[in-house]
Image: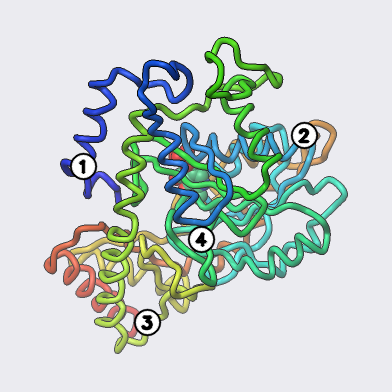
Amino acid sequence: MAGTEIFDNEEIKAITDVIERKMIHRYGSHNSRNGHYRVDEFENKAKAITGSKFALGVSNGTAALIVALKAMGVKPGDEIITTPFTFIATIEAIVECNAVPILGEIDETLSLDPESIEKLITHKTKAIMPVHMFGVAADLDPIISIANKHNIPVIEDACEVVGGTYKGKYLGTLGLCGTWSFDPNKTLTVGEGGMVLTNDEDLYNKMDYYHDHGHIHSKEVDRGDEGKSGFGVNYRLSEIQGALGIVALDKMEMAIGKLRATKKKILDAVADTGIKPRPMNDNEGETASHVIFLMPTAEDAKKFQTAAKNAGCGCGIIADNTWHYAKHWEALDAMSEKDFFGTKAPSYAPETMANADAILSRAVMFGLNICMDEESINKIIDSIRAGMKAIKQ
Ligand SMILES: Cc1ncc(COP(=O)(O)O)c(C=O)c1O
């Protein structure tokens, strides 16, 4: 799963070059860097791959979400509709903008259920934020169509699915903007890094200024002479990460190809057991970072988990995942029904997530590595078969 698996001489060369040239800042020093701008190249590669008009490298995926929301003009007390099944960073980014997370339902694809969105829209809704979780696209067509009907922008949290697609388009490029993460747990990593993709020039400019202290970037003047657009923060990416990012994107197809091949091998080998793989909104576009199955009941999921572990390969039940499921976040529950910058937050009590729980407590998950030998793959297959045998007994 972690992109460090595919590190080799390419990364060493890329970093060494930056160190030897002693040019680590992505901006400024135009006269002494001989035209080397590694973060620019990383962004240009992301644009060339995805077809996105603009790409902004930032320090991580959480920063990418915050920069995007800020640039979209999200203000204290605004509401952002998202999903209870996401990494905690999605919610943190919303709260960091002093906005109120409004949680929809999920469906069996484990993504935001489009049917749950419309009734949550109010005059305070400033964005809809679907999250493409564990390698699979949310159902963007209906989500975007609801958003368009109400004139609300969509920001895709595509942090987990760099290189994944929905109906042939790269995830992160279908909404007003989308975010990627290259953190150490992702299929492609630069250590820590993020990217925002958008076709909207005005939004891009605002994000560009905000992520770097309000600098109006220019290659014509020294950094100290650049114009100021207003307050910002420092979520810059360094040239080391930029250099790693260029290599990472070059390896994207290879890494996803290997994951997809492994997943197919596993699914083919267990198809005769009658197991139900997680349904997907686009089977072709997944990044195959995880293999997830839906058991008939939560009790079956527990039986499956125990038997799989005894057979050599443990799996998680997603409802137990304390970092990726809002039911577990006391800090969020503490906001329940409180006034939050002039908006009354909804209840985030665990019982409000009963529908999500009914699905997530049936979902069992195996994480995949990019480079897996036959023995490890077979261990997963044997464990799945043992799990299915246990629930049939
Ligand atoms: C869905 C989702 N959003 C946002 C993030 C945040 O990315 P980062 O770790 O780069 O800050 C992650 C990272 O795990 C994620 O999975």
Q: Report which residue position mark 1 lands on.
A: 10
Report the disc number at residue 170: 4
Question: Left or right: where does residue 342 sit relative to residue 384?
Answer: right
* In the rendered image, the vertical position of residue 110 relative to residue 244, given as above or below: below
Q: Earlier in the sequence, mark 3 or mark 4?
A: 4
Report the disc number at residue 387: none
Query: Between marks 2 and 1, how big is the CA–CA gap?
Result: 43 Å
Q: Report which residue position mark 2 lands on.
A: 75
Asked whether the beta carbons under mark 1 and mark 4 sit within 8 Å of each other, the answer is no
Question: Left or right: where does residue 251 sit relative to residue 210?
Answer: left
Q: Secondary structure at mark 1?
A: helix
Q: Earlier in the sequence, mark 4 or mark 2?
A: 2
Q: Earlier in the sequence, mark 2 or mark 1?
A: 1
Q: Earlier in the sequence, mark 1 or mark 3?
A: 1
Q: Nearer the viewer, mark 1 or mark 3?
A: 1
Kind of residue sitting beneath label 1: Glu
Residue 121 % position (x, y):
81, 56
Q: Nearer the viewer, mark 4 or mark 2?
A: 4
Within 10 Å of disc 1 (Cα), the crowding (few <14, some 14-19, many 20+) is some
Q: Report which residue position mark 3 lands on.
A: 275
Q: Earlier in the sequence, mark 1 or mark 4?
A: 1
Query: Between marks 2 and 3, how big is the CA–CA gap?
Result: 46 Å
Query: Between marks 4 and 2, how big is the CA–CA gap?
Result: 29 Å
Residue 304 % position (x, y):
33, 71
Kind of residue sitting beneath label 4: Tyr
Residue 348 % position (x, y):
67, 47
Within 10 Å of disc 4 (Cα), the crowding (few <14, some 14-19, many 20+) is many
Query: Between marks 1 and 4, how big is the CA–CA gap?
Result: 25 Å
Q: Is the residue marked 3 within 8 Å of ligand 1, measured from its CB?
A: no
Q: Nearer the viewer, mark 2 or mark 3?
A: 2
